[in-house]
């Protein structure tokens, strides 16, 4: 089955096409505020590079967050539109799961961290158990101090991945300085979810028909959009 994957949950736009055995074509661009302008041309480009027509697609996969609200909406809306128009199933992937899945060669707890702005982060924890990636702490949002508390409570060697981990690396390291925990940080290559990773993950789900219709797909926000937060704060004052 050929799957088109879309990721716009962070400050990058990523698109890939894969057939379950390999990624046929992919493209990524860092674009903090131009997700809408970049996405449609990238979808056309990747399909052309893979020599795949829309009629050959078997499913659409998309990052449903958590992440940047505006970016998420662009990717999810585009994925739904394609799924509706082609009558295809859709597979929603959590951005934190996608980050963890790319960090396969470790026995440490993989701590996926995405910058949520406002000095907050989204995070979850995973372990590679055998050949399976297992979520051991569900996605949550909060200040960096709460993330550190969860890591200390876990009391296991940790590998931090994601743009939130890199942004707050100094604060995390200083907060864990006296914990005697072995920690490390993945490099920039693993700082953002990738559509290429989504293709592989989605295919494993598609084999068992673990998918949804486009109207069933819902974003994973974890908190209110910034605009709504600002309005609530103004109203309260």
Image: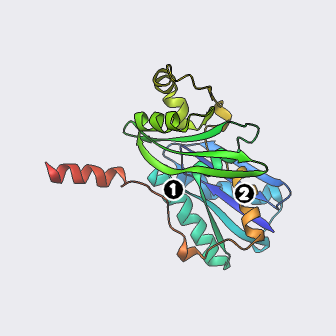
Question: In this rendering, is residue 18 above or below 122?
Answer: below
Q: Classify the position of the N terminus by image quarter.
A: bottom right
Using the image as rendered, state which of residue 153 and residue 132 is in the foreground.
153
Determine which of the numbered discs, if any, sits on residue 141 in the image: none
Taking 206 as reference, is 178 left or right? Answer: left
Taking 9 as reference, is 89 left or right? Answer: right
> Spatial distance from mark 2 to mark 1, Cα to Cα?
19 Å
Q: Please tell me which residue is depicted at 76% across the width and 60% down the height of the picture.
A: 47
Question: In this rendering, is residue 197 above or below 83?
Answer: above
Residue 229 place in picture, x, y as percent = 29, 51
Q: How is the image coloured?
A: rainbow
Looking at the rendered image, the disc whose residue lies closer to the viewer, 2 or 1, is 2
Question: In this rendering, is residue 125 above or below 1?
Answer: above
Using the image as rendered, state which of residue 236 and residue 231 is in the foreground.
236
Question: In this rendering, is residue 85 above or below 160?
Answer: below
Q: Mark 2: which secondary structure? A: helix
Residue 180 place in picture, x, y as percent = 56, 22
Residue 103 place in picture, x, y as percent = 70, 40
Q: Which residue is mark 1?
A: 72
Q: Please tell me which residue is depicted at 82% across the width and 58% down the height of the picture.
A: 50
Tell me if label 2 and label 1 are in contact, CB under 8 Å: no
Q: Mark 1: which secondary structure? A: helix
Q: Which residue is mark 2?
A: 201
Image quarter of residue 105: top right
Q: Please tell me which residue is depicted at 55% across the width and 38% down the height of the picture.
A: 154
Query: Around disc 2, counting alpha carbons within 10 Å, would you say few (fewer than 14), some (14 to 19), or many (20 or more)?
Result: some
Residue farthest along the right direction in this orientation: 21
Residue 30 place in picture, x, y as percent = 59, 41
């Amino acid at each position: 089955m050929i799957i088109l994957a879309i990721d716009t949950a962070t400050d990058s736009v990523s698109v890939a096409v894969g057939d379950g055995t390999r990624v046929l074509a992919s493209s990524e661009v860092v674009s903090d505020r131009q997700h809408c302008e970049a996405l449609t041309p990238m979808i056309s480009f990747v399909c052309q590079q893979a020599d795949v027509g829309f009629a050959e697609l078997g499913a659409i996969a998309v990052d449903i967050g958590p992440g940047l609200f505006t970016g998420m909406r662009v990717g999810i809306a585009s994925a739904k539109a394609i799924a509706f128009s082609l009558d295809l199933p859709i597979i929603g992937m959590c951005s934190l799961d996608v980050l963890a899945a790319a960090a396969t060669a470790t026995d440490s707890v993989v701590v996926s961290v995405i910058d949520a702005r406002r000095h907050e982060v989204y995070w979850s924890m995973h372990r590679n158990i055998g050949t399976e990636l297992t979520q051991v702490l569900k996605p949550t949002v909060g200040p960096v101090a709460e993330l550190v508390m969860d890591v200390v409570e876990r009391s296991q060697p940790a590998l931090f991945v994601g743009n939130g981990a890199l942004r707050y690396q100094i604060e995390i390291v200083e907060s864990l300085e006296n914990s005697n925990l072995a920690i490390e940080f993945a490099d920039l290559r693993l700082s953002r979810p990738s559509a290429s990773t989504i293709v592989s993950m989605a295919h494993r789900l598609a084999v068992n028909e673990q998918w949804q219709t486009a109207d069933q797909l819902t974003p994973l926000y974890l908190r209110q959009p910034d605009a709504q937060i600002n309005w609530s704060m103004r109203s309260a004052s």
